[in-house]
Image: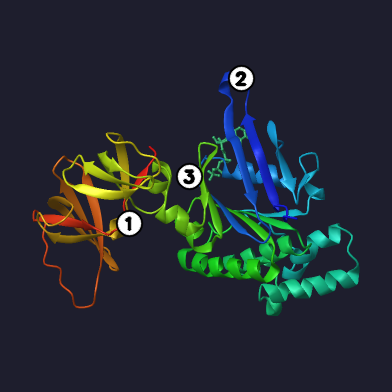
C-alpha cells in the first residue's frame, strides 16, 4: 500500500472579507507533501503563503476543500490537538525564563512528567548545540541562538510536521546562511516533515527537497529546486526564480518535444517545448549563464553591448538585440583574465544546446 502524504491539501480556498471586497488569499490549492520532506512555499509578499501555513496549523478554516494529515482530514481539529507545530518569524520567547525553561514550556503544558521533561530538555539542548547555555536568560543570548531555542521548543513535543514561517528573516546575512545549514541538519536528524515559507528564492533553492511557487493565491509550479530553476513552466516562475531572458519568436518546425524557432530579433534556435504547432507565436526563456559571447554573426543571436557590469564572481553583459529586445549574458570571471569587450561592440551570442525552453505566458 502506498504511504499517505504527510499533508495533503485538496482544492483549498480561503477568502477574507465580504462579497465584492473579498480577497482570495488561497485559491483552489492542491498539494501533497511527503513524509520527511523539506517542502517550501515560495512567493512574493501577499501571495498567500502564510495563509496556507495557518490553514495547515488550524488557525484558519478553509471556505472550500480539505486538509489531510497522514490520510485523515484535520480541518475540524483544533490547532492544539494537531501534531503540528509552528516556528514564527518573531520567536515569541519568554524573556523571564531560561533557555531550557523556554524549550520545555510547551511539553510542560502538555502534562509531560518531570523526568520526561528533564530528559527531553537535555535532548533538545544537544540537538541545537546549546547545552552550555541552558540556564541563560533569553536577553543573554544572540539572535541566532534565540532562533535555535524557538526551534528546539517547537520540536520538543515531537510534532509530525513543523511549519516554519520566514524563521530566518530577522537574522543578518551570515547568520542566515549558517541557520540554513542548521535547519537542513535538524530536519534530516529528526526526520520530521518541514513546511517552510519564504520569499527568498535562494533560501528555497538551497534548502528544499521540493518547492511550490505561489502567486496571487495559486500554486503555479511544484518541483525540485533543479526542476524549478532549469525547467520553469511559466513566465512568473522563470522571472521570480533566478534571472531570465525572454525572447519572442514563432515555430517553424516542431516535433513532440522540440521546435525550431525563428526569433523576432533575427536568427534561429532549437527549444524544448511540449505540443507546439507550426506558425505558433511563442515566448522562450533563457538563463544568462547558458549563453556565451562570440564574434558578430557567428552566434544564434546578434546585437551590441549596451552595458557591462562587474559582479566579482561574474560579469553581466547587457546586449541590445536588433529588434529592441534586451539580452543579459553572464560570464564567470577567471583570475587574471581581462575581458576585452567594451560598450558599443557588436557581438554574437551562442546558446548552449538544450538551454532554450518555450514557456506559457
Ligand atoms: P507575506 O510574505 O507578506 O507575509 P504572504 O504570501 O504570506 O505574504 P498572506 O499573509 O497569506 O500572504 O496574505 C495573502 C492575502 O490575503 C493578502 O492580500 C493579505 O492582505 C490577505 N489577508 C491575509 N490575512 C488576512 C486577514 N486576516 N484579513 C483580511 N485579509 C487578509
Of callouts 2 and 3, the N-terminal one: 2
Is label 3 or label 1 in front? 1
Residue projecting furthest to the front = 255
Which label was assigned to residue 354?
A: 1
Q: Is the residue indicated by label 3 positioned so its CB lies within 8 Å of ligand 1? A: yes
Location of the C terminus by quadrant is: top left
Residue at left offset 24%, top offset 49%? 269
Q: Which residue is mark 2?
A: 19
Q: Secondary structure at mark 1?
A: loop
From the top left corner, tell me how far across and down residue 310 is, in percent: 23, 63
**x, y percent for residue 140:** 64, 70
- In the visual, does 256 lie left or right of 288? right
Q: Which of the two discs, 1 and 2, labels the residue nearer the N terminus?
A: 2
Q: CA distance from mark 2 to mark 3?
A: 25 Å
Q: In terms of secondary structure, where does tag 3 sit?
A: loop
> What is the distance, in whole Å, between disc 3 and disc 1 at their CAs?
29 Å
- For marks 3 and 1 on the same chain, the one whose residue lies earlier in the sequence: 3
Would you call the spot at circle 2 few (<14 residues within 10 Å), some (14-19), or many (20 or more)? few
Ligand 1 in which quarter: top right
Residue 65 placement: quadrant:
top right
Q: Quadrant of residue 68?
A: top right
- Check disc 3 and report the residue beneath it: 44
Q: Name the residue at the bottom extreme.
A: 132
Q: Nearer the viewer, residue 280 or 347?
A: 280
Q: Is residue 118 left or right of residue 260?
A: right
Amino acid at each position: 500500500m502506498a504511504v499517505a502524504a504527510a499533508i495533503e491539501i485538496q482544492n483549498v480556498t480561503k477568502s477574507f472579507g465580504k462579497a465584492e471586497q473579498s480577497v482570495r488569499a488561497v485559491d483552489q490549492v492542491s498539494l501533497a507533501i511527503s513524509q520527511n520532506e523539506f517542502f517550501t512555499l515560495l512567493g512574493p509578499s501577499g501571495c498567500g503563503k502564510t495563509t496556507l501555513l495557518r490553514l495547515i496549523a488550524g488557525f484558519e478554516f478553509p471556505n472550500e476543500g480539505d486538509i489531510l494529515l497522514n490520510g485523515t482530514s484535520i480541518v475540524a481539529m483544533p490547532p492544539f490537538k494537531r501534531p503540528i507545530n509552528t516556528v514564527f518569524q518573531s520567536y515569541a520567547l519568554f524573556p523571564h525564563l531560561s533557555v531550557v525553561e523556554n524549550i520545555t514550556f510547551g511539553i510542560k503544558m502538555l502534562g509531560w512528567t518531570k523526568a520526561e521533561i528533564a530528559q527531553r530538555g537535555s535532548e533538545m539542548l544537544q540537538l541545537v548545540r546549546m547545552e552550555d547555555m541552558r540556564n541563560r536568560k533569553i536577553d543573554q543570548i544572540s539572535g541566532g541562538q534565540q532562533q535555535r531555542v524557538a526551534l528546539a521548543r517547537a520540536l520538543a513535543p515531537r510534532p509530525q510536521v513543523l511549519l516554519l514561517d520566514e524563521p530566518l528573516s530577522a537574522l543578518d546575512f551570515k547568520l542566515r546562511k549558517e541557520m540554513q545549514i542548521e535547519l537542513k541538519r535538524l530536519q534530516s536528524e529528526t526526520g520530521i516533515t518541514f513546511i517552510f515559507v519564504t520569499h527568498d528564492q535562494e533560501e528555497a533553492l538551497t534548502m528544499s527537497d521540493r518547492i511550490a511557487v505561489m502567486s496571487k493565491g495559486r500554486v503555479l509550479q511544484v518541483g525540485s529546486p533543479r526542476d524549478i530553476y532549469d525547467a520553469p513552466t511559466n513566465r512568473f516562475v522563470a522571472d521570480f526564480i533566478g534571472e531570465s531572458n525572454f525572447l519572442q519568436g514563432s515555430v517553424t518546425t516542431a516535433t513532440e518535444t522540440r521546435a525550431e524557432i525563428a526569433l523576432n530579433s533575427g536568427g534561429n534556435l532549437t527549444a524544448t517545448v511540449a505540443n507546439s504547432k507550426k506558425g505558433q507565436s511563442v515566448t522562450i526563456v533563457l538563463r544568462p549563464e547558458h549563453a556565451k559571447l562570440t564574434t558578430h554573426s557567428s552566434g544564434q543571436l546578434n546585437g551590441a553591448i549596451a552595458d557591462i557590469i562587474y559582479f566579482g564572481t561574474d560579469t553581466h553583459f547587457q546586449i541590445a538585440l536588433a529588434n529592441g529586445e534586451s539580452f543579459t549574458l553572464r560570464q564567470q570571471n577567471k583570475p587574471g583574465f581581462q575581458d576585452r569587450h567594451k560598450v558599443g561592440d557588436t557581438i554574437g551570442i551562442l546558446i548552449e544546446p538544450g538551454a532554450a525552453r518555450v514557456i506559457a505566458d
